[in-house]
Structures are given as C-alpha cells and as structure tokens.
Image (cartoon, helix red, strand yellow):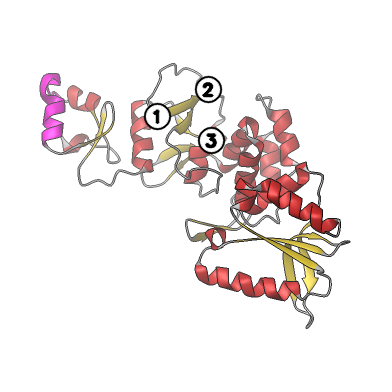
Amino acid sequence: MRTLVESGVLLTTRALKAGWPRSSLSRRLQDEGWVPLRHGAWAERTTAVDLDLRLKAAQLMHPELVVSHRTSARLWAIEQLGSAAPERVEFTDPGLTSRRRLTGVNVHRLPLADTEVETVGPRRLRITSVARTLGDLLRSGPRDDALVAVESALTRRRFEGVPRPPLATRPSLTTALAGPLLGGTRARQWLSLVDLGAGSPAETVARLRMHDAGLHPETQAEVRTRDGRRRYLDFFFRAQGLAVEIEGYAYHGSRDSHRRDMARFNEIAHCPEVHRLLRFPATAPLYHPTRILQDIHRALSGG
C-alpha cells in the first residue's frame, strides 16, 4: 500500500487500480491507522496533517486545480485580515471545466497563463504566482483585505515570526491587472491607494479608515528628536503637529520590541515638531475605527 503513496497522500483510486478490493479497502485503511484527508484520499498515521498535505490531496484528486486567492497568499507568507488559515481553501480551475462541488473548497473558474502558475514546496504544490495572487485578491475584494495583502507583499515583513523580503513590485501588479478579467477597473483604482510605508495590517487599515473620512496625513513622516536623531511616525498631520501611532507587540513581533516601541513613543512625544501624540493599540483600527477618527478629529480641532 505504501508504494502507492505520492507526496504523503494515498488515493483510493490508485489502490483500487493496484488490485485492492473495493469491499474491504476502507476497513483495511482504518485498521492500519491511515488518516482520512478527504473522501478518497488518506495519509499515513505518522504523517503530519497540515494545510500543504490537504491541498496536495485535493490537487492529486483534481489535477486541474491551482491553489489561489487567500490560500495562495498564505503559502507565499503574505499577511491577511481575518483567519490565517480559513476553513475553506481556494483553488482556480484555469480550464474552466470543473463543475464538481468539493467539501471545504472554493473553486474559481478563471483563465490562467502558464507564467502565472508556480510549483512550490516539497509537496510541489501548483499555486498562482505572487503577482497573480494579489491581482485576484484586488479583483475579488473586499478592498481592505486586498490592500492589507498587497502592502504586506510589497514590503519587508515578519510572517509568523520569520522576517522575509518584499515579494513583488508595484509594476508587476500593474501588469497582473492589465487583462480584461472582471473587477479589473476597480482593482486598478484600489491599487492607487497602496502606500509602501505601511508596516503592518493595522497601519494599512488605519490609513484606509482615515482616507475614507477625508483625512490624509503623511505616512512614515520624518521628525527629529531634540538631540537631532531621526524618528519616523506612522501618521503625521504636520501643520497641526499631530502624530498618530499604532502600537502593539501583536504586530511588532515580541514583548521586547513592544518595550522598545514604548521608549520610542516617549522620544517622539518630545520632538519639537510634535505637539500632540495619539497612540492606539493594533486592534483599534480593526474593531474600533470610529473611536480613532473621533479622537483625531477632536485633536485636529484643538479639543
């Protein structure tokens, strides 16, 4: 039986073709401790069942499918809003042929060029390229979710505690959005909102909330401490001297970096250009945006 395993997955169809009787196959697999991945696919009990393995099982059963959208973004180590591992995985069927409903799977029927598909990882998963993945997210929305992913991919970030370099460029996204696919016009408009100064999903969402409210501060604005050292503010309304900082070790990596942030905030508060400093936790832009906007409006009006 183990000789039929590919990339950690045993397909029932292969076992049947090899001569194992249909009437007793499932019972045999259960008795030997094989782990069901989905109907018709199994893993050995010693194999760690993770997202990659489940995706590989789906692709072995349906070779036309390419991992895409939010699931591809996760494999590329791109930050996203919401759950890091959504219950339903996403694939694209570039042949536009699949009509079968798969449990726990969303299938997008979209054309894909060969250059937009890459094979990655030890299980050799076929997934959409970074640029195509971001293009799909921009076309399908929602806006904030898409721009969080785009700004993560275009900048240096830490993903699950591991630093990584930028994964794409703005020109590559412009090219990815050049085709006639549905949602392209809106996606190109959203791309114009990208700010490479964003350092976390929370900063992206905070900026978008301010943008929607008609507030357009400088991002990553440079100021000087009293002894001449440079400091960069998340957001700065320079005319009013109002600095806005998004804090929280949830995005900055550790409690030590959080403590360094606190020392930095104290330095910023004493910069001659900064007359007032507003600080918000990383959760505030996501769950309490109205409170942030009210505080900013009050500070800008001198309240």
- Pick whichever of labels 3 and 2 is earlier in the sequence: 3
Q: Give the number of the disc on residue 289.
A: none
Q: For the residue marked with disc 2, what is the amino acid?
A: Arg
Q: Is residue 226 visible?
A: yes
Q: Secondary structure at mark 2?
A: loop
Residue designated by label 3: 69
Asked whether, in this view, residue 238 is left or right of residue 247, the answer is: right
Q: From this viewpoint, which residue is outermost toward the right?
A: 239
Give above or below for 299 relative to 1: below
- Pick whichever of labels 3 and 1 is earlier in the sequence: 3
Q: Secondary structure at mark 1?
A: loop
Q: Give the number of the disc on residue 109.
A: 2
Can you give x and y, in whole percent of width and height, for residue 229 in the image? 75, 78
Mark nearest the camera among 3 and 1 is 1
Whether the magenta-drawn stretch holds residue 302 is answered as no
Q: Secondary structure at mark 3?
A: helix
Q: For the residue marked with disc 3, what is the amino acid?
A: His
